[in-house]
Image: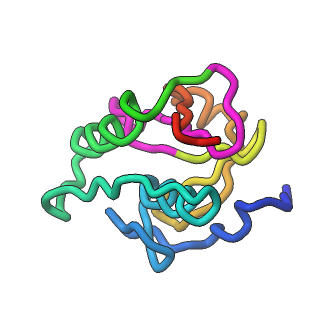
Amino acid sequence: AFLMSWSNAYIGLPHVAFGRERDGCDCWGLVRLVYREQLGIDLPAYAPARACALEEAEIEALIGTAVIGGDWVQVARPEAFDVLVFRRGGYRSHIGLVVDARFMLHSPETGSALADITAPRWRSRFEGAWRFRGRA
């Protein structure tokens, strides 16, 4: 499916663990980049103390610090730019941005892409949607 939206400017960015810029980003880095460029909101970098922190539990803690609680509120009806949280293994360790009712923008290891959130792969791992409180 081809969507004309803000998300097109972010498709194909390389995946870089703990990356926070256009030359490479992980899932939180992509959220942070989009919020800065599209919404004018600077989110914290949440860069881990050591770049080798690739354990799923540590990533879950990073996502928990970044999204769950604090400046974010859980929402039942996600809208564009809301953050979706997904389990990988037993951990909440992946996030994507709502594009519309069917698609999210996220940063898998193959590079940023759109994914159909209605597909069983994502529906079965969905943990919730969060909205940034400071968003107009």
- Residue at the image position 64 percent from the left and 20 percent from the top: 76
The quadrant where residue 67 appears: top left
Q: Does 33 appear in magenta?
A: no
In this view, 18 is above or below 22: above
In this view, 123 is above or below 60: above
- Residue at the image position 59 percent from the left and 66 percent from the top: 37
Q: Is residue 50 left or right of residue 127?
A: left
How far from the left and from the top, in percent, is residue 65?
Answer: 30, 38
Q: Does 89 appear in magenta?
A: yes
State the residue in front, 47 or 36.
36
In this view, 44 is above or below 70: below
Numbered range of the magenta stretch: 76-95
State the residue in front, 108 or 18.
18
How far from the left and from the top, in percent, is residue 19?
Answer: 37, 68
The quadrant the C terminus occupies is top right
State the residue in front, 126 or 82.
82
